[in-house]
Amino acid sequence: YDIGFGGLDHMFASGRDVNILVLDTEVYSNTGGQASKSTPRGAVAKFAAGGKPGRKKDLGMIAMSYGNVYVGQISMGANPLHALRTIRAAESYRGTSLLIALSHCIGWGIDMTTAMDQQKEAVACGYWPLYHYDPRDEAQPFHLDSREPKGSFKEFAMKQARFAMLARSKPEESERLIALGQNDVDVRWRTYQNLAEVTKNAGASSGDGNGADKSAGKEVNA
């Protein structure tokens, strides 16, 4: 998302048969918990003591813009079957593939024994949509694999110290950022939903794709 992105972007453009797995903890976990472009809006981290003001970078959308990169967003805690199928499809793709896996972190300020439940809630409320983009499926490359969001971003966020500590120290600012965070969730979901519909309609008018991996294209609802 930050330091390694130049090399990552170069790999996307190369088209080489390389499989990339991003374990997204949404913070610089290996250097003490600094904020990064992966950190969501409103989360407290080093260098973002007042809550990160901007939205999270959408790495998957950047990769999809090349058109020839397999992209999957997964969560083992929310849907292990979807994760497994997406991993296998990415491995079988003869080109660059990117998998973005939600990876809980002690830096979130959670009881780590409940981490898998946190992942389920992240997907359920729309904070972490599951999807895959397969260039082999020319008719419909983008598939949104999650159900419609239920619950609110605030309910999910307030179970984590990275969000809750700002609510205690600066409640008004916390409310503002949480509202913006909910808007981020809503906009991202509508964007993915529209993308899935556009590719679906395009596929209906152009016929079936050539050489698509049909087993990898199955929708698995979280």
Image (cartoon, rainbow, N blue to C red):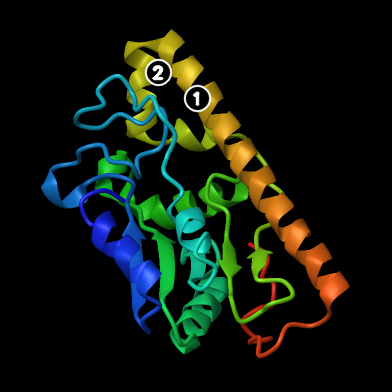
Based on the displayed image, in which of its 4 quarters is residue 190 positioned? top right
Q: Rate crowding at label 2 as few (under 14), some (14 to 19) or many (20 or more) other CA atoms within 10 Å.
A: some
Percent from the top left, x then y, of residue 193?
71, 52
In the rendered view, would you say 147 is above or below 66? Answer: above
Direction left: furthest residue: 31
Asked whether disc 1 touches disc 2, contact meaning CB atoms under 8 Å apart, the reply is yes
Percent from the top left, x then y, of residue 12?
38, 68
**Disc number lying in front (1 or 2):** 1
For label 2, the SS is helix
Residue 69 located left or right of residue 6: right
The residue identified by callout 2 is: 167
Pointer 1 or 2: first along the chain = 2
Based on the displayed image, in which of its 4 quarters is residue 136 positioned? bottom right
Measuring 72% from the left and 71% from the top, which residue is drawn there? Answer: 140
Residue 136 located left or right of residue 33: right
Q: Rate crowding at label 1 as few (under 14), some (14 to 19) or many (20 or more) other CA atoms within 10 Å.
A: many
In the rendered view, would you say 191 is above or below 4? Answer: above
Percent from the top left, x then y, of residue 85?
55, 80
Measuring 36% from the left and 11% from the top, which residue is drawn there? Answer: 170
Amino acid carrying mark 2 in the image: Ala
Alpha-carbon distance for marks 1 and 2? Answer: 9 Å
Check the picture and name the quadrant holding the C terminus: bottom right
Measuring 12% from the left and 47% from the top, which residue is drawn there? Answer: 31
Residue 220 located left or right of residue 16: right
The disc at residue 178 is 1
For label 1, the SS is helix
Residue 128 located left or right of residue 136: left
In the rendered view, would you say 26 is above or below 79? Answer: above
In the rendered view, would you say 201 is above or below 138? Answer: above
Percent from the top left, x then y, of residue 20?
34, 72
